[in-house]
Image: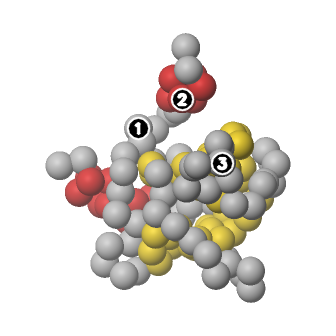
Amino acid sequence: MTDDTKRQERRRYPRLRAPVYCRPVGPLAARGGQPIDLGLGGVRVYSDDPMNPGHRLEIELKLPDESTLTFLAEVVWLQELPDEAPASYDIGLQFLDLTPEDVEALEVVLARSNT
């Protein structure tokens, strides 16, 4: 069983590729990127910055309609990637403080990505 298969079995929410842009919030947040996959419970991203599980950061998601969602997320896993990969690390983030409005906005994006 691969690490990806093990992670998928633990997920409470399905993950999809969605047309959003993700970046950490703050003065050092110039770099961001397309999430690898996104669900109501979290997001998987690439990063060149190592982050230990348990690390919390504020992230911003830019949605297809140009609106943004900003909330707290926690690193739940980190995997170092090979040198030829697009980034140094593959990171799983769990959303911590989504409001009902945030959940509704994500549901709309995910529903459109699933069709």
Quarter of the image with the N terminus in it? top right
Q: Where 27 falls versus 86 (above or below)?
A: below
**Closest to the observer, 30 or 57:** 30
Mark 3 — residue? Answer: 83
Return the x and y of residue 8 as percentages of the image width and height. Answer: 50, 29
Q: Nearer the viewer, residue 43 or 35?
A: 35
Q: Secondary structure at mark 1?
A: loop
**x and y, in percent, of residue 110 in the image:** 32, 54
**C-beta proximity under 8 Å, tags 1 and 3:** no
Give the residue displayed 45% in from the left and 49% down from the top. Answer: 37
Disc number lying in front (1 or 3): 3
| Residue at (46, 38) in percent of width and height | 13
Q: Which mark is residue 14?
A: 1
- Going by the numbered disc 3, the residue's amino acid type is Asp
Q: Which residue is mark 2?
A: 4
Q: Nearer the viewer, residue 106 or 101?
A: 106
Name the element at disc 2.
Answer: helix
